[in-house]
Image: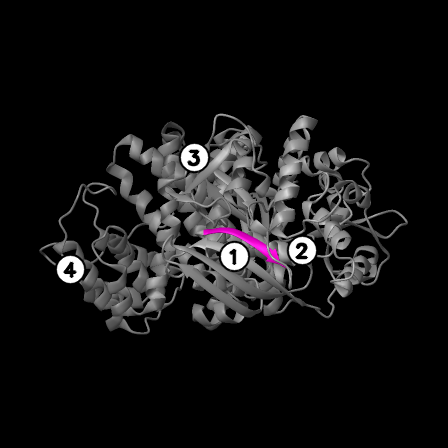
Amino acid sequence: MKVREDQPVFRDGSVDLEAWLDRLEGKTPIVDPEELMRACRIARTAEQETDHRANQWGEGESTFLTGLEMVEILADLGLDQDALVAAVLYRSVREEELELDTVKDQFGPKVANLIRGVMQMAAIHTKYKSTKVSVFGQNETQGEAIRKMLVSMIDDVRVALIKLAERTCAIRAVKNAPAARKYKVAREVFDIYAPLAHRLGVGHLKWELEDLAFRYIEPQDYKKIAKLLDEKRLDRQEYIKKVEDIISSEIEQADIQAQIQGRAKHIYSIWRKMKRKNISFSQVYDIRAFRILVPEVRDCYSVLGIVHSLWRHIPREFDDYIASPKSNGYRSLHTAVIGPEGKVVEIQIRTKEMHDDAELGVCAHWLYKGTDAKKASQSRGYEEKVAWLRQVLEWHDELGGVDEMVDELGSDVTVDRIYVLTPEGHVVDLSSDATPIDFAYKVHTDVGHRCRGAKVNGRIAPLNTRLIVGDQVEILTGSEAGPSRDWLNSDLGFVRSPRTRAKIKHWFKSQDRDVNIRDGKDMLNRELRRFNINKVEMLQLAESVSLTTEDDLYAAIGANDIRLMNVVRHAEEIMNPAQPKEIQVRERKEQNHSGDLMIRGVGNMLTTIANCCKPVPGDSVAGYITLGRGVSIHRDDCVNLLQLRSKEQERIIDVSWGKEVRTTYPVELHITAYDRTGLLADIMTTLANIGINVTGMQTLSDKSDNSAEMRVTVEVENISSLGRIMALLTKVQNISDVRRVYVGKQSD
C-alpha cells in the first residue's frame, strides 16, 4: 500500500503551495505550473469563504486538501494538466463551494467536462443499493451491474481515474468516522471501485482500496493478519535483504541489468488466499516475495533459470503469464522456491514494460491488436468499453495528451446495454433503446401489465421515453392488469424489447374471445376511419387475410395474431384496386422475394421467409441458420425466434432489408386540433424528424371555439409509412384527429 504523504506546511499550518508544487514536478511534468497553482488558490479561497455544513467526509477533512491529495495520486499515474486541475477543483464543485460555470470560465470546457463526468458517476452513490445477490432474474450481481453502469457512463478515461483517486481519498478519510460511515464507504469501494481499478489495471490503487475496505468490513480478520505480519516484520526485512543480495550477485555475474524489490503481500490478498485454499497463515507462500524487473523478455527466462539453480522450486507453484497472459493482459513469470533457511519465497519476474502495465493499467489493448481506430470506435459491449479505456491509457503513456487519443480512437464507444435504477436503488440492465414499459416488464410481468405511467429521475415522463444510463425509474401502476394496445404499435415507440412485446401479445391472446372480438372490431373501425376507407365488405376483408368470418377477423386483430396495418393494407386494395397500383405491386414483390435481404457478415446465402411470423419489409428482423435450408428470416419479436435465442443463440444472425430505389406518392391528411402557439411548428418538426417531405399545407383557425383544421400533403412510400405518420401526428399536443383524404372525396 502506498504511504500517504503529508502536504508541506508553514508554521501556521497552512499548505506551502510552492513547496507542494515543487514536489509534484518531481513526479510528473507540469505543462503550466501557474495554472495549477491558480486552481489551488481558487479551491482554497472557495473553502474559506463558504459557510460549512457538517463535513460528510470525516472530522477535519477539507475539500481543498483532498483536492491536493487527489492530484498527487493522479500524478503517480502520469495524468495530464487538465486532469490535475479538475482533481483540485472537483470536491469544491461537488460541495457547492464553487460553481461549475466558474470553472468553465476560468479553466475552459475540457476541465469542466471532466468534473461533470465525475459528478455523474458520483450521483450513483445516492441511488445505489448494495447487495451481493442478483435481482429481477438477472444473471449478474448488483455489484457487477453497477460497475458496468459506471463504465458505460465514461467517455473519457480520465473521468474514471479521477473518480478512483477521489474514492481512495474518501476511504482514507473515514479512519476516525463512525463505524456505520466506515462500513458504507468501505462496502461501496470494495464492491465497485476496487474491481473497477482491477479491470482498468491500476494495480497499486486496487491494492490500497482492497486493504482499506477490508479493514472496515472485516476488522477482526484484518487485525489478526496485520499482527502476524507485524510480528515477523524485522525478521522478514533481514531475510529479504539476505535473499536480495544473493539474487543480485548471481544476476550481476550473468551480466543482466535488473531491479530487485522485496515486498509484503497485501493483507486482503493474504486473507483471500487463506480462505480460497483453506490454509493457515504459515502456508501462504508469497508473504515473502520479490519482484525482479529486467530489460527484455529473454532476460525474464534467464533470471528464472538463475533462481531455479539457486533453490529448489515448489511444484505446481510456477506460472508463465508471459507465454499465456491473463485475460486482462497481465504478463509476468511467477515461481515459488524453498529459499535460505528452508523458507518459502515467491518471485515474480517481468520487464519494466510489463510492470508498468500491471501497476498503471497501460497494458490493455489486447482486444484491439491488429485492428484500426475505426473498428475500435464501433465496438460494442462492456468488455470492449473497458478495453477502449485501457487503450487510451496506453496511448497516453506513450505519446502524452489524452484529448488527442480520444479523438483518434473515437469517443463513441458504447455498450449494447444500459443500466438504470429502481426507486430502491437496485440496478436493472436493459437494451440500449429501452423505455419505461420495457423496464416495467423487466422488473415483473405483472408490473408491466398494470403500468399506467412512469417517473424518470423523480419527474413524470412519457411511456415512450428513451432511457439513458443512470436514470432512476419508478413505475406508476393501476389496480387491474390491462396493457394498452397502443404499446404494440411500433410507430409510437412504446416498446423496444422483443421480450416485452411477446409478453404483451401473450396477455391479449389470453383474453376471452368475446373481449378480443369487441376490441378488434373497435380497433379496425377506428383505423379504417382514419384512412378514410369506408366502402369495404368485412367478410371479403376477412377472406383476403385467409380467415373465414368477420368475428374471426376481429378476434385475430384483438389477440394480435394479425397485424392491424396488414388488414388496412388489404382493405385499401379492396376499396381502391387501381389507385396506388405501383405501390401494391411493389409491396407484393417485397413480401415474396427474400432476395432483397442483405445478410451481414456471411455473404450471399439462401434465405426463406419464416411462415410463423411472415415478416414484411420495414419489420425489424433477424436470421436463423437452419440445417440445409439456408437462413430463415423471422420478425424480431417472433415467439419462435425468442425460443431459438434461448437455446441456440450462436445460430442467430443480424439481417436487414436490402436497399432499393424509393418510390413515393402524395397523400393528403386532414388534421383537427385545438389551436395553440407553436402547433404548426410542432407538426412540421415531427414530420421532418422522420424524413417526410411536405408538399402542401392549408390551415384554417376558428377563434370562436379555438379550433384549427389543416390540410397537409405529404409524400409517402406505402400505406405502412402513412400509418406511422398518422400515429405520430396524433401524439402531437392538442391534435384530436388525423385522417386521410382522397382527392375529389369528402372526408367523413
User: Mark 3: which secondary structure?
Assistant: loop
Query: Is label 3 or label 2 in front?
Result: 2
Which residue occupies 18% across, 44% down? Answer: 60
Lower position in the chain sequence, tag 4 or tag 2 = 4
Name the secondary structure under disc 2.
helix
Where residue 35 appears, x then y in whole percent? 26, 71
Q: Distance between the residues labelled 1 and 4?
A: 61 Å
Label 3 crowding class (10 Å Cα cut-off): few <14, some 14-19, many 20+? some
Q: Residues within 10 Å of mark 1 (few under 14, many from 20)?
A: many
Residue 431, disc: none
First to last magenta residue range: 735-741
The answer to whether the residue labelled 4 contacts the one labelled 2, judged by CB atoms less than 8 Å apart, is no
Relative to 91, 489 lies left or right: right
Identity of the residue furthest to the right in this view? 628
Q: Which mark is residue 720?
A: 2
Residue nearest the observer in this picture, 59 or 13: 59
Q: Residues within 10 Å of mark 2 (few under 14, many from 20)?
A: some
Describe residue 664's horizontal placement relative to residue 71 as left or right.
Answer: right
Of callouts 1 and 3, which one flags the residue occurring earlier in the amino acid sequence?
A: 3
* Residue highlighted by disc 3: 130
Q: Three-letter amino acid code at disc 2?
A: Ser
Q: Which amino acid does label 3 sit on?
A: Ser
Q: Is residue 246 left or right of residue 231?
A: right
The residue under label 1 is 671
Q: Which amino acid does label 1 sit on?
A: Ile
Along the line of sight, which residue is nearer the eye, 66 or 724?
Answer: 724
Using the numbered discs, state the Cα–Cα distance from disc 3 to disc 2 in whole angstroms.
47 Å
The rendered magenta stretch, by its main secondary structure, is classed as strand
Q: Distance between the residues labelled 1 and 3?
A: 52 Å
